[in-house]
Image: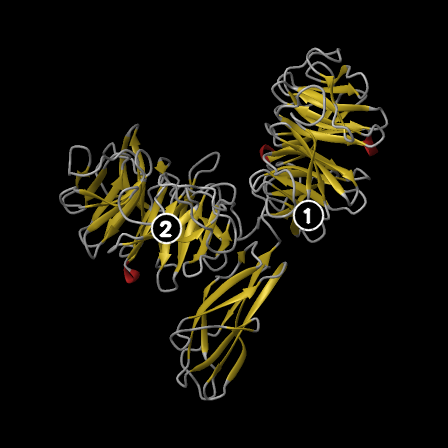
């Protein structure tokens, strides 16, 4: 059953005594956010006039008699149901005119690089190297909260946290922070204190820490570093540093590249993996002497591939490692060196595919050895070692919308107006993928494709032709030769629409009147005329005048004014108009044209004719920009990034809107009537977001 519901009035006509009818515009159903507040927008109609609209008890405001209304409401942790109540001027009241449930589990994990568990409280802590924060995670509810960040706590800022260990239960953590710091974090205040660094504490340098473990009996932290690969012992009271093991210290089995770090209190030694030699090493806690536990010649079973995480399971006297080559968790007997696969993508069942490649430096085993927790960049999975079943303890709205999982998108979300859904092309590991996405539920489905057609390509170029109901994309005829194809999204049947040519699209745009298909082809725009069956170059270095084209990205056709809008991502970042008849190019947004934030990495575009503006997804600002087509003034509609980006004129821009962080928004489809945009974006929150363009608030609808 879905975690979210949307209940709307569905009366076709008004009956006597009926309260106002309501339609929700934002957020759509089945959404997720990490914001503490969100705008809710919609419309209400009633023949007697609408007296008021309230959302979760908050009075909505309106300038047009509630034909369009908005309310800003608090969003609690969990699954918050926002109920809309209405009344008309005749006194008719409906206390449940509509409702929407929003999932909010706390701040999203943008790139979790390390984690630790407090054995007494059972809480997990994760270091996020993108948000540069420490996040607390309740494994029972999956809820998350920030305990230290640039805006929470005082002291040394986190730069690139790579390792994490509990220092004092319920009180403090140790963070190994690249390039050379070991930082104590107070869990009550978020304050950060440097224990050792290049300028604090004596002894050897500690460059590029990648993992840390703390041994209370010794009062020392042990930090694994790279370049050079070694393990350094740190006195947590004085900050003094000493090499425990390295290519010249400790002796024993030589190594090339270390990964993972786990401590065995009973044997008084550490375990680490030599990634290049595919060898599990034991390292004496006092002498640093290294011995082989398991490698291709010691022990039986699957050979190590690329190992990320290492953990000691004291209950079963074994070392657990996560291997990204086989996408598996291996158990290594510390006596014999034998290796056994105990969890993998092909063993057991899962709430989501187990992806070892995204695991960070640590695994964590529970006290009784029954489960192991694996850190992925966007969540924590718990793996039952008896059944190999793995479930999410916490994640960034994994499962928002039903499978198949959405891989990184390569196109804008294209609206299939006949079936009330979006079409998104994605690039998974094995093959190109074309998905349909339900904007109300977030559910995804593979579009059927005729099995006889094995050369369909889904780069950036996908469009929907509303008259025929066909999806327009490309098929490779021979190497370097392509034809346009119409795909029936219901049956999967295809029909060639064009003659072959060498053009491969990064974006497609359709002319509904002239039966032309426009393609942006890196440094040119080409067109195929369906009537004459001819290809032609619309604009290039030799066709048309104006700024040079280097790497075109977004492409939108304005059928009313017969003009193309395109973005130039490289060279001089800019937004252009292109005359499809003459090929003439005119800059409408750049460092020297227009006012407001200068485009940095402009990508997808969407035309809002009702508001006389072009909306641009900009991957440099991590924002949506609106360009007034009369004044060429630019303004930010939604943005994240805390003002880190600066344009060529030295201007920064404040963040706009609440909700999930934007990362390199790719493409846009606009619902102008509801004043919302649907946006595809890259890692780490790859999927489809919905943006309310009045407030800039964002929610995830499918990933």
Residue 269 location, quadrant: top right
Q: Nearer the viewer, residue 544 or 63?
A: 63
Q: Residues within 10 Å of mark 1 (few under 14, many from 20)?
A: many
Considering only order in the chain, which callout, 2 or 1, is on the residue closer to the N terminus? 1
Residue at 63% x, 27% y is 180
For residue 151, above or below residue 573 = below
Front tag of 1 and 2? 2
Please report the residue visible at 49 percent of the width from the left and 72 percent of the height from the top: 60
Image quadrant in which the N terminus is located = bottom right
Q: Position of residue 562 (x, y in %)?
A: 18, 52
Rendered image quadrant of residue 335:
top right
Residue 70 in percent (x, y) is at: 46, 68
Front residue of this view, candidates 462 and 494: 462
Instruction: Please name the residue that numbered disc 1 is placed on.
Output: 137
Q: CA distance from mark 1 to mark 2?
A: 35 Å
Q: Position of residue 559 (x, y in %)?
A: 21, 54
Task: Count the marks.
Answer: 2
Check disc 1 and report its element: helix, strand or loop. strand
Q: Residue 328, image x and y in percent?
A: 64, 32
Q: Residue at x 38, y 75 (%)?
A: 64
| Res 587 visible | yes
Give whichever of 567, 337 is nearer the camera: 567
Label placed on residue 625: 2
């Amino acid at each position: 059953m879905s975690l979210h519901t949307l209940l709307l009035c569905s009366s076709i006509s008004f009956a006597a005594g009926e309260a106002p009818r309501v339609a929700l515009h934002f957020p759509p159903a089945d959404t997720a956010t990490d914001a503490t507040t969100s705008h809710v927008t919609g419309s209400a109609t009633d023949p007697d006039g609408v007296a008021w609209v309230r959302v979760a008890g908050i009075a909505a405001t309106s300038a047009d008699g509630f034909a369009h209304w908005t309310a800003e409401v608090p969003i609690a942790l969990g699954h918050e149901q926002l109920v809309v109540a209405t009344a008309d001027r005749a006194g008719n009241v409906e206390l449940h005119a509509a409702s929407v449930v929003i999932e909010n589990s706390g701040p999203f994990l943008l790139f979790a690089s390390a984690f630790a568990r407090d054995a007494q409280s059972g809480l997990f802590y994760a270091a996020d190297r993108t948000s540069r924060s420490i996040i607390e995670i309740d494994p029972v509810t999956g809820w998350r909260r920030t305990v230290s960040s640039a805006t929470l706590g005082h002291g040394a800022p986190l730069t690139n946290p790579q390792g994490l260990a509990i220092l004092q239960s319920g009180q403090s953590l140790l963070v190994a922070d690249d390039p050379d710091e070991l930082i104590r974090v107070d869990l009550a205040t978020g304050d950060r204190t440097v224990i050792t660094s290049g300028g604090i504490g004596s002894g050897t340098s500690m460059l590029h820490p990648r993992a840390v473990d703390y041994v209370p009996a010794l009062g020392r932290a042990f930090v694994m570093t790279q370049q050079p690969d070694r393990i350094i012992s740190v006195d947590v009271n004085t900050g003094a540093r000493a090499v425990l093991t390295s290519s010249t210290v400790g002796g024993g089995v030589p190594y090339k590249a270390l990964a993972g770090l786990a401590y065995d209190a009973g044997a008084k030694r550490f375990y680490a993996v030599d990634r290049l030699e595919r060898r599990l090493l034991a390292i004496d806690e006092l002498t640093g002497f290294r011995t082989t536990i398991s490698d291709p010649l010691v022990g039986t079973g699957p050979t190590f591939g690329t190992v990320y995480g290492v953990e000691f399971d004291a209950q079963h006297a074994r070392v657990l490692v996560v291997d990204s080559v086989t996408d598996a968790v291996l158990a290594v007997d510390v006596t014999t060196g034998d290796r056994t696969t105990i969890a993998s993508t092909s063993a057991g069942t899962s709430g989501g595919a187990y992806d070892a490649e995204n695991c960070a430096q640590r695994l964590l085993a529970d006290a009784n050895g029954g489960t192991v927790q694996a850190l992925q960049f966007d969540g924590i999975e718990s793996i039952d070692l008896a059944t190999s079943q793995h479930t999410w303890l916490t994640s960034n709205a994994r499962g928002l919308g039903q499978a198949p999982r959405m891989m990184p998108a390569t196109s804008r979300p294209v609206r299939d107006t006949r079936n009330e859904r979006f079409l998104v092309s994605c690039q998974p590991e094995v093959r190109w993928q074309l998905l349909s996405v339900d904007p109300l539920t977030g559910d995804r489905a593979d579009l059927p494709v005729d099995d006889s057609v094995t050369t369909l390509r889904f780069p950036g170029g996908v469009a929907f032709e509303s008259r025929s109901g066909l999806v327009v994309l490309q098929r490779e005829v021979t190497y370097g030769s392509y034809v346009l194809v119409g795909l029936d999204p219901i049956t999967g049947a295809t029909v060639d629409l064009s003659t072959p040519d060498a053009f491969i699209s990064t974006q497609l745009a359709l002319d509904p009147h002239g039966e032309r298909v426009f393609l942006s082809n890196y440094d040119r725009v080409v067109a195929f005329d369906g009537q004459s069956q001819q290809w032609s170059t619309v604009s290039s270095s030799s066709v048309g005048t104006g700024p040079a084209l280097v790497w075109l990205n977004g492409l939108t056709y304005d059928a009313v004014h017969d003009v193309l809008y395109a973005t130039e991502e490289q060279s001089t970042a800019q937004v252009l108009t292109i005359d499809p008849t003459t090929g003439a190019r005119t800059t409408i947004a750049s460092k020297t044209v227009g006012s407001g934030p200068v485009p940095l990495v402009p990508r997808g575009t969407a035309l809002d004719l009702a508001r006389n503006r072009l909306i641009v997804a900009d991957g440099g600002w991590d924002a949506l920009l609106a360009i007034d087509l009369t004044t060429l003034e630019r303004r930010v509609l939604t943005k994240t990034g805390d003002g880190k980006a600066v344009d060529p004129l030295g201007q920064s821009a404040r963040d706009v809107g609440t909700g999930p962080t934007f990362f390199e928004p790719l493409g846009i489809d606009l619902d102008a009537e509801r004043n919302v945009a649907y946006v595809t974006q890259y890692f780490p929150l790859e999927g489809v977001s919905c943006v309310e363009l009045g407030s800039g608030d964002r929610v995830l609808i499918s990933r």
